[in-house]
Amino acid sequence: QESKLWGGRFAEATDGLVELFNASVGFDQRLAEQDIRGSLAHVAMLGQVGILTPEEVAQIQEGLQGILAEVRAGTFEWRLDREDVHMNVEAALRDRIGPVAGKLHTARSRNDQVAVDFRLFTKEAALDLADRTRALRAVMVREAEKHLASDGREAVILPGYTHLQVAQPILLSHWFMAYAAMLERDEGRFRDAAERMDESPLGSSALAGTPWPIDRHATAEALGFARPTANSLDGVGSRDFALEFLSAAAILGAHLSRLSEELILYSTFEFGFLTLPDSHTTGSSIMPQKKNPDVAELARGKAGRLFGNLMGLLTVVKGTPLAYNKDLQEDKEGVFDSYDTLSIVLRLYADMLPKSVWHADVTKAAAARGFSTATDLADFLAREGVPFREAHEVVGGLVGLASRSGRQLWELEDAELRAAHPLLGADVARSLTVEESVKSRQSFGGTAPERVREAVAAAKAALS
Ligand code: ARG
């Protein structure tokens, strides 16, 4: 058995089960590119400040490039007994170029390496998810525009709900724009997090900094970071950058889960508001009629792991004293998982939504049911000078009457309406269409077609 890179003080070999338990190479090999980039920046700096000779630097750089090529080609041999990505790369470097490889670790620690590798990864992941979130947001805005009135086609009207009870009619486009607004903030959260984590911990060394005359600004710049972290304990001991990433991911996951729930519900036979595309649904092995919204259900269910990944790392971090503790090795899998989960769900939704077909006749009929224009009737009375609370009471009585007799508000008799309030009549009740209701909601941010059109135009401008 090969001796450990840290084996100097040990007399007995590592227990086999300990080796298995301790090793992270099974998952942190995903950081190989970042690890080698970090080493290349570090060794170049060691040369610049005169710690290594130009020949040593050149040998190490060449060796690292060779390893990078093997990693990319998938031919690199990952060894469990070499524990993690950092020591796999370093030991492979020694196999290639001999003892001079040992000079790479001058003025550096593995704590440094893992902190810098993982920040590089998480920053890239945050920016990638920001881009993908933006792409889905653009799809939402396009869908919103598609369902506005155009060449003879009416705008699609949807029942708006509170408590999942019919509330007031809205435009389907308004609904899409609500999700576009959530996604805009989700994108922003990823970008904010990426900006805050844009600091290089490299050179914090084990925890206290180093006596070597290193240039942390140079390595930070070479790795594309805005600056080095300002405190060495914080640099190697903090994982709030990963927590922020996981938190932005969890919030986005919650939004996608709400969207999924609505699509699942609205595509049921009972609602019939939309048909999901065959390409994004599945059948049943026993029931021939089935078309199941598996993609939407999984997207809803994935919220569980996205929340779990955040909660998991919060719990790992909370009891650890400064600076590095091996507990922190538990930071990576959740981040990888949240990243992978969201990058696929965001892509699936960007494909599925434009292929889904909304049934405007069904949604409009549903929007008219459930006394959805009762507020409009109360507003009518209030506009005539009746205090709104009184108007609310009057219309509530009419809803009760209509509901008991199985009628809609516009089916009430002229006499019944007048009895409820002298200002009311059949003409008023009949004018209570869902179109009029939607059209009247002109307040800024409201569902009136003009407002939604403005919102779509503003979003398109922001996205272009
Ligand atoms: N594999 C370790 C991790 O993922 C790397 C850092 C190890 N540092 C140490 N002092 N044991 O956190």
Image (spheres, helix red, strand yellow):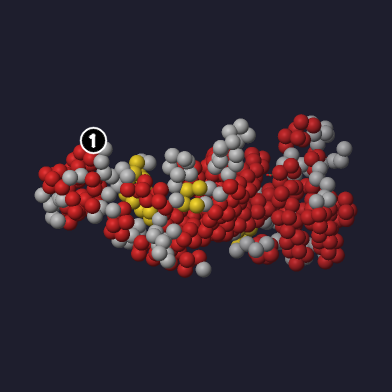
Question: For residue 15, which quarter of the picture?
Answer: top right
**What element does badge 1 sit on?**
helix
Left or right: where does residue 72 sit relative to residue 200?
Answer: right
Write the residue at 76% across / 31% down: 17
Q: Is residue 316 left or right of residue 265?
A: right
Q: Nearer the viewer, residue 82 or 184?
A: 184
Q: Is residue 81 above or below residue 224?
A: above
- Residue placed at 69% from the left, 64% from the top? 222
Residue nearest the viewer, comparing 346 with 266: 266
Tell which of 207 and 460 is nearer to you. 460
Which class describes the residues within 10 Å of circle 1: few (<14), some (14-19), or many (20+)?
few
- Left or right relative to 10: residue 289: left
**Residue occupying image coordinates x 12% and y 52%:** 423
Label 1 belongs to which residue? 404
Looking at numbered disc 1 in the image, what kind of residue is underneath it? Arg
| Percent coordinates x, y for residue 383 in the rendering | 17, 56
Give left or right: position of 457 versus 429: right
Residue 289, image quadrant: top right
Residue 63 in sight in this render? yes
In this picture, is 347 found above or below 8?
Answer: below
> Which image quadrant shows ligand 1?
top right
